[in-house]
Amino acid sequence: MTEYTAESIQILKGLEPVRARPGMYIGSTGKSGLHHLVYEIIDNSVDEALAGFCDTIKVSLHEDGSVEVEDNGRGIPVDPHPETGKSALEVVMTTLHAGGKFSKDAYKVSGGLHGVGASVVNALSEKMEVWVHRDGLIYYQAYSRGKPLCEVTVVGKTNKRGTIVRFKPDPEIFSTVEFDPDIIQTKLRELAYLNVGLKIIFEDKINGYTEVYQYKGGISEYVRYLAGNRKMLHEVIRISGEWEDVKVDVAMVYTDSQEQDLIYSYANTIRTVDHGTHVTAFKNAITKLFNEYAKSLGILKKDESFQGEDVREGLIAVVSVLLKNPEFEGQTKAKLGSEIAGVAVSKVVREKLTEYFEINKATLKIILERIAQAMRAREAAKKARDLVRRKNALENSALPGKLADCVSTDLEKSELFIVEGDSAGGSAKQARDREFQAVLPIRGKILNVEKSSIHKLLNNEQIKDIIVAIGTGIGDKFDRSRLRYGKIIIMTDADIDGAHIRTLLLTFFFRYMRPLIEEGRVFIAVPPLYKVSVNGKIYYLYSEEEYEKFKSQLKEGTKIEVQRYKGLGEMNPEQLWETTMNPQTRKMIKVTIEDAEEADTLFNILMGENTAERRSFIERHALKVTYLDV
């Protein structure tokens, strides 16, 4: 046994803690953490804009995999730091908790407040370079994995001012170092909406295009953008005010959508993905206010009241606060914890909305009727769910007749295959291991839940079979304790129709059983595309690339027999087991959600009714398609 002594205690110096535990500083070492690096540098430039010293930011993706952020702010100070004697630039880039955000004089309001942003990015970069344009000179320093490669050096003269930061993420740290232009553009777009007049340029040198974001309408224009294809029932309501030095800015609109609210929240222009005190206060304030109005106008009886979900159905809102010294939960700033922000939002929203509705009584009436409609729909849906639940409890055939259930009741061992078509379903039932594998065949393309009401969904036979088989219920009634299978596996043909059915099923799971995806319980089976026989030996190949590579490795003149599978039904049960269902040999893709709200927007674009938005998305991504099954 290794002795545990004082020598066992390690002291990590400088930026070593960041490289040892990157998740503590950026959330993850996956795709979201990678893009968080870009956000940290961009946020520093936005802080210069908030302080009134910057009006243009440029973000560039380079072909070598690096990203560059340039602003025309004051430029990072380069003079010697009084405590260390080193250039302030080097101190900021190589020292945790060193930055201008701690000084009350440098920044009144800022998003970066812990002084770790730039240094963390530096620590997690294979290489970083910084150019500072200041006082007529260009200063330069380069780093590798947080350590300076040279002294701060004057490399030229300039009549500009500002900072340029270029970095390349470290492949030793991240599971992927490939930036997604769409994710970065979403961030830049929202920053342009939040900072009226700020010009943000995005240049993608890999794919060869440039976008410019600059908006005069601010968050009102942002709400109209978020509404997309949804029909807005009234003009966007914009309210703003200040309480105890906290500035509150809210834009909101009700739409005809039957989805729950879409609320984007920000604190000092930083997106608070998990919301926080400001959003909780906003929700409570509008729920209380609309209940009071509805009772005073006779829309609600004394013993009736709108629930929060009624008030928020179809609502699209942006809630933004600016405050000194905000308190976030974690360095990634996903959730605002400042109590004062909640109090400020509550007071401003109630006061300003009351003033607004005194003048705009017609808008108030439209909103109250919309909320009342949501309340009636909720009550009707509850009756429909109760009816399904009662039928399942009373009838002997509680589980769907097509479901071939498994023997095991061990959640972590059992798995449900949702299979496209009765023919493939029949083969799957014969191929499966009955001990732990259940099979539910579905016929044809299921309901597109993105375009359907909850009533239509609950009356759809295929959707109802899936809900009953899985056992958890859906939406706000989802109960994980009733889950019957540890893995839900979507198994469809390897063609366009199969891909469409997969997408429809994923849309359903995302909208109504999202915890299954968040817990990593939803998978996509990967059936083979080819069966190749070489001298009596069988090979299964799962993609065009795999097939071409296999052929290129054969000796010239080798005779092969090739069968291309067009569907699961072409495989006999033994082949289906061996290639797609056997846990020892099968290939599966786990479905994950890197950013739930971005996924929400994407599902709305691709599965909703806005054909113009969908066409635009397809045109932007068409060049990325390398294989098309027609």
Image: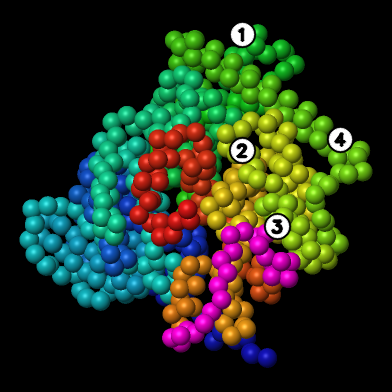
Which numbered disc, 4 or 3, marks the residue closer to the eye? 3
Among the two numbered marks 1 and 3 on one chain, the one whose residue lies closer to the N terminus:
1
Residue occupied by mark 2: 449
Q: Nearer the viewer, residue 17 or 368?
A: 368
* Rendering quarter of residue 129: bottom left
Distance from label 2 to label 3 (Cα)? Answer: 24 Å
Q: Is residue 278 visible?
A: no
Q: Secondary structure at mark 1?
A: loop
* Rendering quarter of residue 236: top left
Q: Residue at x 71, y 48 (%)?
A: 442
Asked if the residues shown at circle 2 and circle 4 are in contact, with their CB atoms under 8 angstroms apart, the answer is: no
Q: Residue at x 41, y 29 (%)?
A: 224
Q: Quick one: quadrant of the N terminus?
A: bottom right
Q: Where does residue 387 sit, x and y in percent of width and height?
A: 82, 32
Residue occupied by mark 4: 390
Q: Amino acid at mark 1?
A: Leu
| Tag of residue 424 | 3
Q: Secondary structure at mark 4?
A: helix
Q: Is residue 303 visible?
A: yes
Distance from label 1 to label 3 (Cα)? Answer: 58 Å
Q: Is residue 6 magenta?
A: no
Q: Is residue 567 above or below residue 528?
A: above
Which numbered disc, 2 or 4, marks the residue closer to the eye? 2
* Rendering quarter of residue 249: top left
Q: Where does residue 571 sit, x and y in percent of width and height?
A: 67, 65
Among the two numbered marks 4 and 3 on one chain, the one whose residue lies closer to the N terminus:
4
Among the two numbered marks 2 and 4 on one chain, the one whose residue lies closer to the N terminus:
4
Q: Amino acid at mark 4?
A: Arg
Q: Secondary structure at mark 3?
A: helix
Residue occupied by mark 1: 297
Q: Nearer the viewer, residue 233 or 363?
A: 233
What's drawn in magenta, residue-wise?
Answer: 554-577
